[in-house]
Amino acid sequence: MRLHNLKPNAGAKHRTKRLGCGESSGLGKTSGRGHKGQRSRSGGSIRPGFEGGQMPLHRRLPKKGFSNVRFAKKGAVVNVSGLEERFEAGQVVNEAALREAGLIKGACDFVKVLGNGDLTKAFTLEGLAVSASAREKIEKAGGSVAESAAES
């Protein structure tokens, strides 16, 4: 098989309509658009959802419901295993330190430390929300957690 032998599958390609090539072509004169009317004119198309002036469906149906999604607090999650990898023993860990270490990116309302993984180093956590399992592991390793308003 060579490049010059390659062909598309049978039926994969179809010739394009060549409009306005004389009456005998079958697509001459009105070029398949019929006589008069909106779609026979150039630029004669309607936007999606337009119902010919009738009140469209999306305006006929009642507006219903409310979503709190835009008011939700967005939190960043850090696991104990991430702290183990990125920080030295005895280091103070806060949001700024986590950003510098690359564990948090982008905007967030709060940072929560979860207890996934093992911990052998002692850290001091400041201004972070901490889960019960993470608090247990940090204190077992000899670290401490400063109380914060963001606890949840």
Image (cartoon, rainbow, N blue to C red):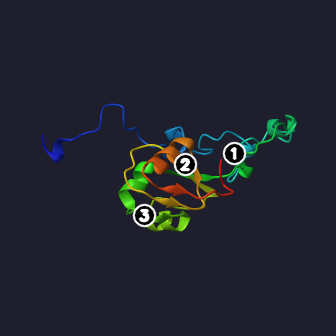
Q: Which of marks 1 and 3 is nearer the N terminus?
A: 1
Q: Looking at the image, is 19 positioned above or below residue 63? A: below
The amino acid sitting under disc 3 is Gly
Q: Looking at the image, is 16 positioned above or below residue 99? A: above
Foreground mark, 1 or 3? 3
As drawn, which residue projects farthest toward the left? 1
For residue 138, the mark is none
Q: Is residue 151 visible?
A: yes
Q: Earlier in the sequence, mark 2 or mark 1?
A: 2
Q: Where is residue 62 in the image (x, y as percent from the top left)?
A: 87, 35
User: In 3D space, how far apart are the residues under numbered discs 1 and 3 (Cα atoms)?
Assistant: 78 Å
The amino acid sitting under disc 2 is Gly
CB atoms of marks 1 and 3 within 8 Å: no
Residue marked by disc 2: 20
For residue 40, the mark is 1
Q: Which class describes the residues within 10 Å of circle 3: few (<14), some (14-19), or many (20+)?
A: few
Q: Is residue 79 visible?
A: no
Residue marked by disc 3: 90
Q: In this view, does 48 lie to the left or right of 57?
A: left
Q: Where is residue 146 in the image (x, y as percent from the top left)?
A: 59, 59
Q: For mark 2, give the secondary structure.
A: loop
